[in-house]
Image: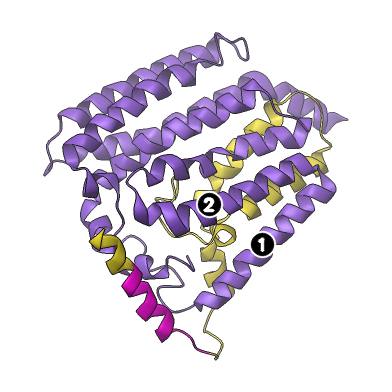
Amino acid sequence: MWYDADVDAVMTRTSRRPVPMGRVQPGEALAFGLTLAGFSVATLGLLVNWLAAGLLAFTIFFYVAIYTAWLKRSTPQNIVIGGAAGAFPPMIGWAATTGALSLEPLLLFLIIFFWTPPHFWALALYKTDDYARAGIPMLPVVSGDASTRRQILLYTLILVPLGIAPWPLGYTGAIYGMTAAISGAIMLMLGWQVLRERPPAERASRNLFAFSILYLFLLFAVLLADRGWGGLIARLAT
Amino acid sequence: MSLVSEGADYRGSLSAGTGLAEPSLATVGDYFTLMKPRVMSLVVFTALVGLAVAPGSLHPVTAFTALLCIAVGQAPPARSICGTTPMSMR
């Protein structure tokens, strides 16, 4: 956004964002961002609790300082480590309710954490030229196409058991377990097709990218239906 | 290596060129676009699930406030990010 306006401008996917377009000045975007970050952390701390606020502050710091300003431009593992920032929201939500953390929110964190690389690298496989032009060391640019396809399948192999784990651990019921198992099997099948695909073709990569979004949504939606719905209604009733 | 330094050079020339004092032509819509609303839906949704699944109770107004804070704090401007965030692809 502000820091990345240079990169946004040369990538076709992001070149129409307000800052690279010159419609919002970089300084204005930075001021807007700092104001939002400060107010959101302070409000969460004062009205809910400071564990949740601290986690939110850490996420913002992690993303800006570690991911955007450093990792994204310096290592092909940028997405793996940067994905941690995107994995924090369910943990912050959990902390907001309980004021504490446990194994279950950690599991939700890990599911998103291991979901991010296959999700993102599937996109990077058919947007490689874009990242190369912007000078971002995305995995296919640096390690090559074949290596990226292997790593996508490797992360999917870790992700799928983690996705099923809340069921055997007793956090949720069989409906969740079956959903996670079936959609996980589809993820593995698509990951396998991505592994066998050769570059000019990009259909398998596009399929995995699209399905990965549905997969994550499904896991969380069924978890909510299975576990949280009753509690949410009880809360609204009181 | 060389790719990274090229990026840094480009950034330098860009910031030199945009050190303007005059206000921009930004509209409210431009600021809304900075929030990348479609990206945020998955972030807010996973936060909602974490909040709802956790044991204990939270007043609905407090829960709404918490989600709003997470959404705003996780929004791209607050992180000053560009496009290579996961879930930001649309």
State the quadrant of the N terminus of chain B. Answer: bottom left
Q: Which chain is purple?
A: A
Give the class, few, some or many, for how many residues have Cα within 10 Å of label 1's Cα (few <14, many ≥20): many
Question: Magenta residues?
Answer: B8-20
Viewer can see residue A11? no
> Could you tell me the amino acid type at mark 2?
Tyr
At horizontal 44% and vertical 60% (from top left) the residue drawn is B82
Q: Main secondary structure of the magenta part?
A: helix
Q: Is residue A26 above or below residue A197?
A: below
How far apart are labels 2 and 1 at the CA level?
15 Å
Q: SS class of the residue under badge 2?
A: helix
Nearest the viewer among A163 and B8 is B8
Toward which corner of the image does residue A199 lie, by quadrant? top left
Q: Which chain is yellow?
A: B
Q: SS class of the residue under badge 1?
A: helix
Q: Name the disc covering residue A63, or none.
A: 2
Q: Is residue B70 above or below residue A170?
A: below
Q: Chain of mark 1?
A: A
Badge nearest the viewer, 2 or 1: 2
Instruction: Work out whether mark 2 precedes mark 1 in sequence or the reverse, and give the earlier one.
Output: 1
